[in-house]
Structure formats: C-alpha cells, structure tokens
C-alpha cells in the first residue's frame, strides 16, 4: 500500500508557488516550459520619430539597424521599429509569439492597422503572431510604435511625482518563441488551486481539497513526459467541476480598462493608450467568445474613430454583437462635484448623442468608477437622459466611515432615484484572482438583500485592459464549490437581474455621496477652476445670443448662420477639461498646458461668436452712430453699476452735462447705474443715483462703507469689524473675541501621500491668521456709485495679497476683488467669516439647486466633511437672518460653529511641481440678509457676481428698440438657466429652467418671440409624452408651468 503523507500546508503551498514561479527554479519548473525554441528576429530597424506621428508618416521615416540592449528616449518621445520575422522550420505550425519588451508602452502595427498593445508593465510582452496573422505563414513584416513612457507615467521618486523628462527605455527582448498552451493551462490550474488552498477559510474543507489536488498534480507531472500533462489537467478539471449550491453569490464579471483621459500623461498619449488597450481587447474577443468589455467616455471613442479608423470598425462590429459595451452615457468620466448643472447636462447630451449616432444605442447606466465625490443632483440629471442605473467604486476610498451599501437606491435632492452599485471588491482593476472574488463577497454589505455584484477586471490606464491570464483564470471560477460564481455578463444583465429579483429589498441613501478623501481637489489648480467657471458662463451667454440671432434671422429671413459646429467644438473642449483628473487639479503640468490652451480657445472664440450674434441681433450697421448697449444674459431684470467704455465718448459727455449720473473711478473708467431687462438688452442710459453710497475714515483709523442696504466697518488690514443691515443693529460678524470677517488664514497643508488631492483634517490645527499689512490702507473710490478701499497684506516673504474692498450703490453685498502673488510650499490660504448666526447646518449651492451640510462635528460622518464643495454661494441662516459668502471661481468651503471659510489657494508639488504658483485674481463677496437666503435673493446675487453686465458699443440703425427682453419669468423661485438652439431642429429652441428654492412653484414664462408650439422634452431634447406636457398652459406668448422642489424642466419651442 502507498503511504499517505500528512501535508504541511505552508510548505505545500510554497512548493506550488515555486513550481509556477517566473523567478525561481525556472530551469526545472513548469513556468520554465511556457516558451520554447526562442529564435532571434531576422532584422530590427529603428526610426526616431519627431513626435506622435501617424503610421503613414512613420513608415516614410529613415530606419536604421538596431538591436536589443539599445536604449531609447527621452520621456514622451516616440520611436518606430520595423521588424522582419522568419519562422524557422522547427516552429512551423506551432503557436509562435513575438516577445517584445521595450520596458515602455508599445503598439504592434501591420499594413496601417494597430494589432495589439504591448507593455513592459504587467508582463504584457507577447503578441500571438501565428494566431493573429496566420498559422502557416513563415514571413512577417511588422512595425512597433514605442512610446517612451510606462503605463502610469514617469513620476520621479514616486508614482505621482512630477515626471522625469530625461528617461531612456531599453529594448531588453525582441525574439520569437513557441508558446506551449498545454503548459499554460496547467500553470493556471496550479495557480488557481494554490490560491483556493491559501485563501478559503479554514472553517470549510474546500481549501484543503484544493491543496491536496494541487499537490497530487505536481507529483503526477513529469515535465519530460507530455502524457502526464493531460492526466494532471484532468485531475484539476474534475475538481473545478464540483459545483456550487443554488443560493451562491454571483459575480457579474465584465472586462474593463479604466482609462484616465489625461493624468500622469497628456491627452495626446491617452489617444494612443486607447488604441493599445482596445486593440488588445479586440484580439481577446476574437479568441474568447464569452468575453465582454465595458467601455465609457464618448470622447475616447471619437479619438479612436478619428485616429484609428480600422480599429474603430472592428470595435463597431463587437458593439453590434453586444460584447464591446459602451457605458456611462457621458462625454468623459467627469469630476462629480465641480461642473455646473448645465455642464453635467452637456456631458450626458454629448455622450448619449454620440453613442446613439455611432452605435444606435443609449446607455442605460451612468458609469463613473473613479471620481472624488458625487453631487446629489446627479440622479435627476441622469434621469433626464433615460439613465436610471449608476455604477461607481471610489467611495470605498473614504478614510473615516465605511459606506453602508454596495447595492442601493440613490436619491437626489429632488427625490429622483437611481439603482446604484459599488463593486464590493473595492477595485475596478481586478485580475481574475481567487483572493479578489473572496474579498468581494466578504466585503459585500447587502447580504440577504441581493446576492449578486459586479466584478470589473482589467488593467487600466494603458495596462491594456483584460489579459488572457484573467480570462483563463476566470474560466476555472465560473461555478466551483467554495467560491462565488464568476460569470461573464453585461451591465444590462446585472442591473436587470437586480431590478427583477431584489429591488424591493434594497435600502435608500438620500443626498450626496461624499468621498471622505481628496477634498483638496475643490481648490488645487485655482486657475483651472476659474477658467472652468468663466467658460461655463461664456458658453451660456454665447448660446443665448446666437440663438436669439438665429431665431430673429429665421423670422426676418436674414443671413445669420448659427455656429453649430463651432459651439459643439467649444463645448467638447470644456467637457474634456472636466475630466476627473484635470478639473480637480491632479494631473501633471503638461496636461495643464493643453487645458489652458483649450480654455483660451473657448474664451477667444466665444468673444467672436458673441460679437457676430450681437451685431445680427441689433442689426448693427456701420453707417449709424455708436451707442452703448448693455446685454443681460440672466433671466431677471437687473439694475447695477456698470463700467462704461470710454472710447465712445458718450458717457464722458453725459457726465459733463449731468455729473450726478456717473462716476469716474480710480482707473479712469466711467461708472454708471443702468437697468436692463431679463434676457435682453438696453441702451446704457445712466439712471440718477437717488441713494449714493459713501465711505468715511473714522478717528480710530477704521473705514465705514455704506449703501442703501448695509454698512461695514473695516480695519486697516481689511477685516470686517461690524457688518449690519441698515435699520438693524445686529452685527452679522460674531462678537466673540478675535473674530473678524474677511480674515485671511494660512494652514500647513501636508497630506499623507496624495499631494494635489488631499487636505487632511489635521491642517485645521495649524491655523495662522494674517495680520500684517504691507502698505497703508487707502480709500480708492469715493462714490456716489462705488466706494472702495485698497488693502495690501503680507502672507510671507515671498507671497502677498492685494485686495480692493468695494460696495456699489444698489448692491446687497460687499465685494472683495483679490490678487494674490503666491509662492508657497504646502500651505493652504483661506478666508474666514465668523458669523453671529446660530444654526445646526449651512447650505451650499450645487448644480441646479443647493444642499445642506452640518455646522457641527457631532458624529464621525459630520467630522469627516471638514472641507466640502459648493458652487457660487454658501449661506448660514437662522430664523429671519443669515449670511452668505459668494464667489466667482472657488469651490472649497468649510463651515463650523458659524465660521464660514472659503478655500482660496493650495500649493501641492505633486504631480505638478508648479501647481498654483504665480499670480491669481478672484472675487468673493459677503452678503448679510434678512428673511431667508431664497427671499433675500442670494441665488440671483451670486449669478450676478459671476456674470457682470457687459457694455458693448454697437451701431443700431434708427428704429431698433432701445430695450428688449426676449424671455422672462415672473417668479424668482424659477431660474431660466439655459436658452439654446435645438440640436436637431433648425426652427426650435430649448429652454431649461429649474426650481431653485427647494419648494413647489408656479411660473409664467413670457417670450417676446413668436413661437408656434411648446412641448416638454427630456435632456436629449426628445419630446415627452402628452401626459407630462399637458400641464403646460399656453396663452399667447405666455407659458405657465408648475415645478416640484428642485425640478429641472426643459422646453422645446418651435418657431
Ligand atoms: Zn481615473
């Protein structure tokens, strides 16, 4: 009888480990047999390309002989290689692979078609030559395009360090060899059994069964006797055929390659990363008929369509088969906090329309695995685009609190609900390993409510997506006792199965999905944030103006041509820059060179488009006299102090005639108070100033600024001592000792690792108020329309602030125009407004609405939100009184115990060593109010601060109206946010409105244009069915509409 030996678990596991190790005992182990008969290439020639050139350009290059051992560089350069391969007789008919390792990213080409990506990282160094190009062919001629970067960029010292620009990359392997598929299958058998033996809990027998099976396999295998190979494989097969019970959890496995549109590499490299990863995916799809791959971001599809048409055709075929699956419905995987409401809408509009046009498919799930928090307005916006399902993963990165669900209903601020799922394995880059599938069920928080979850596998960011190893591993895990079932599925199948079987069991999460990490990203790269906000407004304005010009010329049969293509181009640039590593400020410096070029393009182009549109609207003619016109691109009448252009001479003349009408400011500009109707224009006629503002210096050295609404006492370092509403003694600033409004404070800002991303809670313990002025504080403007002070404050020996504090006649807020010369290292600048308001919460504007967060640290969930995002305003209020802080380009806030803080500038050094260095200009304001922030007009005031009235010199012919309002609403609760031309119809406009107070509302919308019909439509501008549309009342040019709290309504008006 054969002796049965007791097996020591550790040594048995390690024995198997070494048996398949790529490092140890290769001369005698199984892994050492994977490739055989290696053979050199017939020839390799090289061409150093002048940049990221096309294949057609590259093949015309001058190629010279090269060989392995040579190095190529520097970082980000491109090198092309031409390979001649001849298969020797002993390899004929075998599975021959090209083994190529340039220790960088690379792409194999033939005949102008990209065949497959290669990468030294993750061992993606083989290309199955005979399988892809023909088993019986004996000669091959190929090109390899080598990109001098690895998959996660070239960070010096650490992954996120600024890139080392002078690296070289060595071609360490270039040969052909026979791939032994039988050995390969055995390696995966042993590896899977090993992992089951190692990771399955001791409480069941199953791990030990795997251990003994594996050991027996190794005993049985005589590597020199091929007959033993199949016997050993059969043994493993028998084990893997032992099935699960019916109740077992199922993992819906989907291939994925999370592809950052730019991050530690520039946009241009992502274009090539897509080609490398997606060509790998197509090659695998040809071999593995059940393999499905999910792929988001319409922008990346468009890149591949434009640059790799052959590959794109192949992708289209697999999309048709339902295996290459477009997901997400957005233009890029954008930041989830900072884009405006309309920008969110456009992400979906441009994304879904692309997928519909290219693939005849609407995505039914929003796919955003990796962003730094999720606005509670997203569910409603998703639903506007027919999307009711959501997948993300990033919340598992939260530092303090574990989110309590993986499958749940997420409810937005308006009550819209979407079915949401977080893959419980806490990764969107799984590898088909036993440990991961066990971790997935262990982590899963909704056990008993639903027994399914998503398992996303594949290397992201140029790691070339799913690998063959992953697919072969998972073939063992489909249904094997001891592990959850791992089955190749689609997102559609996953969400449909949950909806069918579990949806009544699921819990609900209301409001924001706050990521308790990366909250420095609301502030890092301040100029990117500023340009994002600025460009959102420029596109808003130009769309309104161009749409009015278009409809007017349609009616009058005039010649104006609506700039459809140009507006699409500009929107796409803005949407691309909203990618979740660009807008948050977490990319390398190279990315921001491109981003700012795009922003400048948007600003310059919008200026041209606006001028054209205005000229058409006002019927500009060179023969008439110039007139100053004020344009209002907001949905309410405005009465404000504006800066008139001096070049016309008109205001100056008027000033002489009527000095009470205008003011010449300290810069020599002429200021005047004007009114202009909602979404319209008016001739800039200065209005007499009935209640001038004033400024006085008190004996104690403080300054009093006063207008019809408020008074502020300011000390010689620009701090507010008292801020009162006229007729009310109450100081809006806290009377606690040491409390001043507009107090600049500096913090040490050294995170644990993620430099540009993270501000840690402990920074709050390093608060240092800035108290030194560098120059005497002086009065700059004395009224009657504007009063102002100039303050200069020292930050450090190398950094300083210059601030103009001003108050306009008729303005409800005190304004702070700020310039900072900023040269710090890991410091955080904020400005504080300690208020006298008693409240448990503060309110922050978000996309198309607002959201409340606590003003205290009762629980760990409150404390973890020490830094939060908000848009144009935040407010803290008690009954009948409150204070709001408005801004024109900031997104980081924190409010604790009544102290409101606006985050201004950070100074991280990785991944961009120059982030935020230099000069910055931005404006914020403080607005005390009576009543509520809604009734006091905080929402409108913040829009006005962001979009000051513009004065244009135009030449209208006689007979043109002096003023006109194209659209207006009669209820300030409802904001008419967007007026744009319809995407599909030439004779239609889209109007988007939202309820901004958080209550029900009825509103009359008046149009001064002869529309012929009005219908409600969705975000895609498809007309909704009659039931929804029937609550519109239309009388003449007046439309009456009803809103639910925070409801977004889009209307399609035909002309
Ligand atoms: Zn990402």
Image (spheres, rainbow, N blue to C red):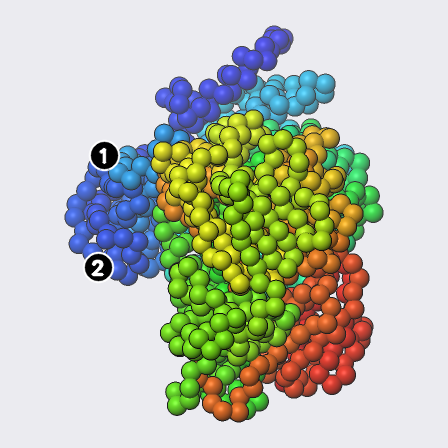
Give the farthest residue toward the front.
699
- The percent position of residue 645, horizontal first and vertical second, equals 42, 71
Can the viewer see residue 374?
Answer: no
Q: CA distance from mark 1 to mark 2?
A: 25 Å
Up the image or down, 997 lies above or below 457; here it is below
- The percent position of residue 673, horizontal first and vertical second, equals 55, 69
Q: Is residue 815 left or right of residue 74?
A: right
Q: Name the residue at 77% across, 50% down.
A: 880
Q: Name the residue at 58% across, 45% down.
A: 713
- Callout 2 crowding tier (Cα within 10 Å): few <14, some 14–19, many ≥20: few
Quadrant of the rendering where the N terminus is positioned: top right
Can the viewer see residue 247?
Answer: yes
Q: Quadrant of residue 264?
A: top left
Residue at numbered disc 1: 69
Q: Quadrant of residue 1048?
A: bottom right
Up the image or down, 50 lies above or below 432; here it is below
Q: Is residue 330 left or right of residue 590?
A: right
Residue nearer the viewer, 338 or 331: 338
Q: Are marks 1 and 2 in contact (CB under 8 Å)?
A: no
Residue nearer the viewer, 323 or 806: 806
Residue at numbered disc 2: 60
> Which secondary structure lies at badge 2?
loop
- The percent position of residue 192, horizontal first and vertical second, equals 57, 29
> Which secondary structure lies at badge 1?
loop
Q: Name the residue at 25% across, 41% down.
A: 73
Quadrant of the rendering where the C terminus is positioned: bottom right
- The percent position of residue 989, horizontal first and vertical second, equals 61, 77
């Amino acid at each position: 009888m054969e002796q049965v030996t007791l097996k020591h678990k550790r040594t048995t596991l390690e024995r198997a480990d070494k048996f398949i190790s790529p490092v140890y005992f290769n001369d005698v182990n199984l892994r050492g047999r994977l490739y055989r008969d290696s053979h050199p290439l017939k020839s390799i020639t090289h061409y150093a390309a002048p940049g990221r050139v096309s294949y057609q350009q590259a093949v015309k290059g001058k190629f010279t002989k090269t060989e392995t051992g040579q190095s190529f560089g520097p970082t980000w350069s491109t090198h092309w290689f031409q390979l001649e391969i001849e298969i020797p007789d002993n390899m004929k008919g075998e599975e021959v692979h090209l083994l190529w390792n340039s220790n960088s990213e690379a792409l194999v080409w033939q005949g102008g078609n990209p065949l497959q990506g290669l990468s030294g990282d993750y061992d993606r160094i083989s290309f199955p030559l005979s399988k892809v190009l023909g088993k019986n062919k004996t000669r091959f001629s190929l090109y390899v395009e080598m990109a001098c970067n690895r998959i996660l960029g070239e960070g010096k010292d650490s992954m996120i360090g600024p890139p080392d620009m002078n690296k070289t990359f060595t071609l360490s392997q270039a040969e052909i060899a026979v791939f032994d598929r039988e050995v390969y299958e055995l390696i995966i058998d042993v590896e899977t059994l090993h992992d089951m033996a190692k990771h399955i809990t001791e409480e069941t027998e199953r791990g030990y069964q795997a251990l003994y099976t594996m050991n027996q396999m190794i005993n049985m295998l005589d590597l020199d006797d091929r007959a033993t190979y199949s016997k050993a494989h059969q043994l493993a097969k028998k084990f893997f055929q032992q099935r699960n019970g019916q109740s077992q959890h199922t993992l819906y496995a989907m291939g994925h390659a999370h592809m950052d549109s730019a991050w530690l590499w520039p946009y241009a490299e992502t274009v090539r990363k897509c080609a490398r990863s997606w060509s790998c995916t197509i090659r695998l799809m040809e071999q593995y008929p059940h393999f499905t791959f999910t792929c988001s971001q319409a922008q990346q599809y468009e890149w591949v369509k434009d640059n790799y048409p052959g590959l794109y055709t192949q992708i289209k075929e697999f999309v048709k088969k339902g295996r290459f699956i477009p997901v997400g419905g957005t233009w890029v995987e954008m930041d989830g906090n900072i884009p405006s409401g309309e920008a969110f809408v456009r992400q979906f509009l441009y994304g879904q329309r692309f997928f519909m046009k290219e693939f005849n498919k609407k995505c039914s799930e929003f796919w955003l695995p990796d962003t730094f928090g999720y606005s509670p307005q997203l569910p409603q916006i998703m639903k506007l685009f027919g999307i009711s399902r959501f997948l993300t993963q990033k919340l598992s990165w939260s530092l303090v609190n574990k989110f309590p669900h993986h499958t749940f209903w997420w409810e937005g601020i308006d009550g819209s609900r979407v079915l949401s799922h977080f893959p419980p394995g806490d990764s969107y880059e799984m590898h088909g390993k036993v440990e991961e599938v066990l971790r997935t069920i262990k982590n899963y928080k909704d056990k008993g409510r639903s027994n399914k979850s998503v398992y996303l596998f594949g290397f992201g960011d140029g790691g070339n997506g799913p690998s063959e190893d992953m697919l072969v591993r998972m073939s063992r895990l489909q249904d094997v006792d001891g592990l959850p079932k791992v089955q190749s599925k689609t997102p559609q199948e996953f969400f449909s199965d949950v909806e069918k079987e579990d949806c009544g069991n699921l819990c609900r999460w209301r409001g924001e999905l706050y990521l308790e990490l990366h909250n420095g990203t609301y502030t890092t790269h301040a100029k990117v944030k500023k340009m994002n906000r600025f460009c959102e407004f420029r596109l808003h304005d130009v769309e309104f103006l161009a749409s009015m010009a278009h409809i007017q010329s349609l009616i009058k049969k005039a010649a104006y041509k609506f700039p459809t293509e140009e507006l699409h181009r500009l929107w796409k640039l803005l949407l691309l820059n909203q990618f979740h590593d660009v807008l948050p400020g977490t990319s390398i410096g190279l990315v921001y060179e491109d981003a700012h070029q795009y922003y400048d393009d948007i600003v310059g182009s919008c200026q041209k488009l606006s001028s054209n549109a205005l000229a058409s609207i006002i019927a500009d003619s060179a023969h008439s006299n110039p007139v100053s016109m004020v344009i209002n691109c907001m949905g309410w009448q405005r009465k404000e102090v504006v800066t008139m252009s001096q070049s016309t001479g008109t205001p100056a003349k008027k000033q002489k005639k009527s000095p009470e009408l205008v003011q010449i400011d300290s810069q020599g500009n002429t200021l005047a108070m004007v009114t202009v109707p909602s979404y319209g224009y008016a001739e800039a006629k200065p209005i007499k100033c009935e209640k001038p503002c004033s400024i006085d210096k008190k004996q104690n050295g403080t300054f009093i600024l006063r207008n019809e609404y408020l008074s502020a006492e300011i000390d010689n370092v620009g701090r507010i001592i008292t801020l009162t509403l006229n007729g009310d003694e109450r100081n809006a600033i806290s009377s606690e000792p040491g409390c001043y409004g507009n107090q600049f404070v500096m913090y040490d800002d050294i995170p644990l690792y993620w430099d540009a991303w993270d501000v840690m809670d402990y920074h709050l313990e390093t608060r240092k108020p800035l108290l030194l002025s560098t120059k005497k504080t002086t009065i700059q403007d004395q009224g009657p329309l504007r009063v102002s002070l100039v303050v200069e404050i020292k930050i450090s020996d190398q950094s300083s602030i210059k601030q103009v504090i001003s108050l306009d006649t008729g303005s409800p807020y005190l304004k702070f125009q700020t310039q900072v010369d900023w040269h710090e290292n890991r410091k955080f600048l904020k400005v504080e407004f300690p208020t006298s308001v008693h409240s448990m919460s503060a309110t922050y504007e978000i996309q198309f609405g607002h959201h409340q967060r606590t003003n205290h640290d009762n629980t760990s969930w409150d404390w973890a939100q020490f830094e939060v995002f908000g848009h144009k305003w935040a407010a803290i209020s008690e009954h009948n009184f409150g204070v709001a802080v408005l801004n024109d380009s900031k997104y980081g806030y924190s409010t604790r115990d009544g102290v409101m803080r606006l985050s201004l500038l950070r100074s991280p050094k990785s991944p961009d060593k120059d982030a935020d260095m230099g000069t910055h200009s931005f404006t914020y304001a403080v607005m005390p109010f009576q009543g509520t922030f809604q009734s006091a007009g905080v929402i409108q005031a913040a829009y006005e601060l962001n979009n000051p009235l513009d004065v244009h010199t135009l030449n209208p012919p006689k007979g043109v109206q002096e003023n006109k309002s194209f659209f207006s609403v009669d209820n300030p609760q409802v904001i008419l946010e967007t007026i744009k031309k319809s995407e599909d119809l030439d004779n239609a406009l889209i109007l988007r409105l939202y309820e901004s107070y958080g209550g029900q509302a009825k509103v009359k919308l008046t149009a001064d244009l002869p529309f012929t019909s009005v219908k409600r439509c969705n975000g895609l501008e498809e007309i909704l069915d009659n039931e929804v549309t029937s609550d519109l009342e239309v009388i003449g040019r007046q439309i009456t509409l009803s809103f639910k709290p925070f409801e977004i309504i889009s209307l399609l008006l035909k002309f």
